[in-house]
Amino acid sequence: MITAYAMAGAIDHARLYESFLSLEGDCDGTVVLHHGRVKRPGKQIASFSAVELKALVPDVDECLAGVARRAERDFGLSQVLIVHRLGRLEARESILLVAVSAPTRRPGFEACAWIVDEIKKEGLIGLVELA
């Protein structure tokens, strides 16, 4: 099962994780989570009060779903959840939540890392302004 989208507003981690777990079967032994946050110093500007993120592609949700589908296929996953924030974010705010389920640890960890790297590599969401 694939769930992937970008959104403005806070990510409700607890609700999303609970929903993710409710869809799990008994064939998966591993759930891996990545909770990305805005940190200081930033990658592009060391000192900032906030960052502004926007979609760089017309259908960012479909592009995120494409990354999720490739991970599901290539790593043998049962479920993939990707939620990426858009809009204004301050340091320590959640920017990305990725959850995957797999039969064993190795493909789960590898898939989660691959998804995060792929989202960055694909250039789907970008920094458009610093405040």
Image: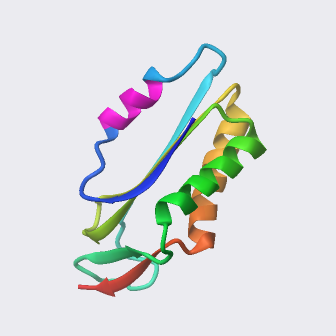
Residue 58 location in percent, x, y? 48, 74
Residue at 57% x, 64% y is 119
- Compared across the picture, whether 68 is left or right of 3 comes to right
Residue 15 inside the magenta-drawn segment: yes
Residue 19 visible, this angle: yes
Residue reaching furthest top?
26
Asked whether 4 or 107 is in front, the reply is 4
Tell me what residue is drawn at x 40 percent, y 33 percent: 17
Q: Quadrant of residue 130?
A: bottom left
Can residue 36 be seen here?
A: no
Q: Is residue 65 above or below residue 16?
A: below
Residue 70 falls within the magenta-colored stretch: no
Relative horizontal placement of residue 53, taking residue 108 as reference (left or right):
left
Q: Position of residue 41 (x, y in %)?
A: 37, 76
Q: Is residue 87 left or right of residue 58?
A: left
User: For the magenta stretch, what is the residue range?
Assistant: 14-21
Residue at coordinates 61% horizontally, 27% vertically from top-left? 30
Q: Name the residue nearer the viewer: 15 or 94.
A: 15
Of 46 and 121, which appears nearest the observer?
A: 121
Picture layout, residue 77 above or below residue 94: above
Q: From what the image shows, is residue 1 above or below residue 84?
A: above
For residue 18, which quarter of the picture? top left
Nearest to the observer: residue 113 or residue 40: 113
Q: Image check: 35 left or right of 107?
A: left
